[in-house]
Amino acid sequence: MKLRFLCAILGVCALLPACITPSVIESSGRALAPPTTNFEWREPRPADFEGLFESESIEGEVAAALWKVWYVFSSGGAYSGAALVLGGTTPEFQTLSGTWSLDGDQLDLGDGQVVRASATDDHLRLASEGGVAILRRSTIQ
């Protein structure tokens, strides 16, 4: 089963149409710990998406199935992502790749997957009806 960005993140998030229903987990237990910093979000620029990002928090219905998400965005408009998903008896990684484009605060990940995006210098916030993911810029080691 392919992860379709962000509902792999967000249902981000509009992409994992077969997310586990959250009725088994209390809503307070469905989110990773929220970031401790108050961010001043702004409309993103294409340069904000260049590089490697990892999830810092995942909230909403999609958090019932997603443990962690990573994305690599290139300046040429390509991306690749992986998510650690709880969907069966054991967690599994799901991957995806494609092209991305930005129009204002609308991040288009292809195949009709559009999420609302905002940014700071080192973070991205991706939101959809399924939830919100905050990603922090990371480095490849």
Image (cartoon, rainbow, N blue to C red):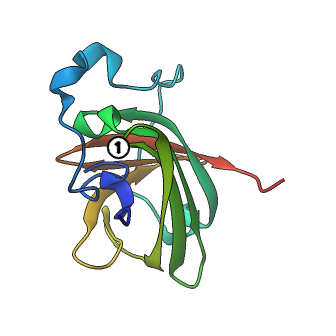
Q: Is residue 114 above or below residue 59?
A: below
Whole-percent x, y for residue 95 in the image: 49, 64
Q: Quadrant of residue 60?
A: top left
Farthest residue, direction bottom: 76
- Tell whether 52 sits left or right of 79: right
Compare residues 135 and 11 and report the one nearer the observer.
11
Q: Which residue is found at the position 22% from the left and 53% from the top? A: 18
Q: Is residue 45 above or below residue 14?
A: below
Question: Judging from the image, what secondary structure is the residue with disc 1 in?
Answer: loop
Q: Quick one: quadrant of the N terminus? A: bottom left
The answer to whether residue 36 shows anywhere in this view is yes
Whole-percent x, y for residue 47 in the image: 57, 68
Number of marks in picture: 1
Q: Which residue is found at the position 36% from the left and 42% from the top? A: 88
Q: Quadrant of residue 73?
A: bottom right
What residue sits right under mark 1 in the picture?
A: 87
Farthest residue, direction front: 89
The answer to whether residue 12 shows anywhere in this view is no
Whole-percent x, y for residue 89 in the image: 40, 37
Q: Quadrant of residue 49?
A: bottom right
Dot 1 amino acid type = Gly
Whole-percent x, y for residue 3 in the image: 38, 61
Q: Which residue is found at the position 28% from the left and 56% from the top? A: 16
- The crowding category of the residue bearing disc 1, from other C-alpha atoms within 10 Å (few below 14, some 14 to 19, many at least 20), is some
